[in-house]
Amino acid sequence: MAIRPDDAAVLAKGIREIFAESEAILLEKIAGALAKGMDEPDWLEQKLLGVQAVRRSIDQVLADLANGIPGAVERAMGLAYNRGVATAGGELTAAGLAHSAFGEVQPTGAVAAIVSDTLARITPMQFQIRRAVSDIYQQVTTQTAAQVAGGVQTRREASRSLLTKLTKNGITGFRDTAGRQWEMGAYAEMAVRTSASNAMLQGHTDRIQELGIDTVIVSNAPEECDICRPLEGKVLSLSGSTTGKLKDGVSVLMSLREAKSKGLYHPNCRHSHSIYLPGITKPHKDTEDAAGHALRVQQRGYEQSIRASKRKVIIAEQIGGKTSPAYLKEKRKLSDLQSEFAGWRDTNDRKDLAYRTNLKAR
């Protein structure tokens, strides 16, 4: 009964939807502000003078976003920790080690640190979002004026084209510890999902260390990445004090700390660990699934393309309306892409993770 990576994904799903919906609202506000007075001769002056009004509308969206995040994160980490404790209890019971000494496990200081670290990653996003949205608005305004003056495009065409280009991958600028850039909804999900996994593992560790158990086995996560593949099914020492061969002949590969330094439990990692009892626990075999990983990467590519297509639809609607040729063209492209993705999922027997393509919460 190992910790399931999907449990962390479920806990992070709500946070992602909050940020994704905020992103869609912000995009609508930028496009709507640009479209206002589009055909007036003093459009540029109006847009430059209207920067403060745009910022106020952005701040309102961000204030609504900030109100719900701390409580949601704290609840998610608490649920994750308790799930880890319960999972460890189930493993111990299955191994015949349950006893009356099992009581409530109180969250350690590590859980509070996980909550604090998660909020430290997410809270600054509000300032980054504000700056990014303001920059996008001003860039589109000034570049549109330059293109129209040069006779390249009409104001409507230029605004839509530039805004689409600048927001192709959403409102970005969020980097993880490896330097990778994320769109805001995906970054928030990654941060919470990773933290929820850590909280579950902490709860699991706190429970089993009550009985002095020091060895765990890394789970088999289908579609594993290249980083974690060498560690699947390996036995680790929680404290680092257990080394060499165990009584069943299986060797402890390294400490959990060392495994983490090699990339285990990286952002969005889908692995976990469970109790390893020599002579009782059966080691995993033949866990490699490189083909599944390739399909997973391909699915993420489809999902990203659909989100980008939906942003184009929002921009075309705000700038040209639902009867404009540009809007109708983008709607057709989105429909075609969604049909193609559905066919690909059916062919490859993949789950429809609809929340990953939603720009607005249901």
Image (cartoon, rainbow, N blue to C red):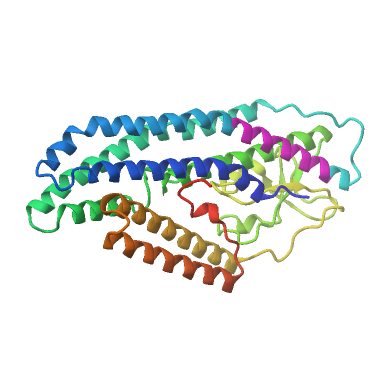
User: Toward the viewer: 320 or 69?
Assistant: 320
User: Residue 251, percent across and down?
Assistant: 75, 53
| Between 243 and 315, the one nearer to me in the picture | 315
Question: Looking at the image, is 147 positioned above or below residue 75?
Answer: below
Position of residue 354 in the picture relative to residue 22 (left or right)? right
Q: Position of residue 135 (x, y in %)?
A: 26, 39
- Rendered residue at 11%/59% (across/down): 152
Q: Position of residue 35 (x, y in %)?
A: 23, 46
Residue 87 falls in image quadrant? top right
Q: Is residue 259 visible?
A: no
Residue 118: x %, y % from top left: 53, 34
In the image, residue 21 sits, relative to residue 310, either above or below, namely above
Q: Main secondary structure of the magenta part?
A: helix
Q: Which quadrant of the figure has residue 198?
A: top right
- Is 14 on the left or on the right of 250, as rendered? left
Residue shown at the point (66%, 43%) measured from the top left: 256
Give the residue at the far left of this rendering: 150
Q: Which residues are magenta?
A: 74-91
For the question of whether residue 213 can be seen, the reply is yes
Which residue ends up furthest to the front in the rendered image? 323
Q: Residue lying furthest bottom in this view?
A: 347
Q: Is 231 or 136 nearer to us in this picture?
A: 136
**Is 335 situated left or right of 230 in this image?**
left
Is 75 contained in the magenta span? yes
Residue in the picture at 77% in, 29% down: 105
Please tell me which residue is depicted at 29% across the width and 46% down the height of the picture. Answer: 31
Q: Is residue 295 magenta?
A: no
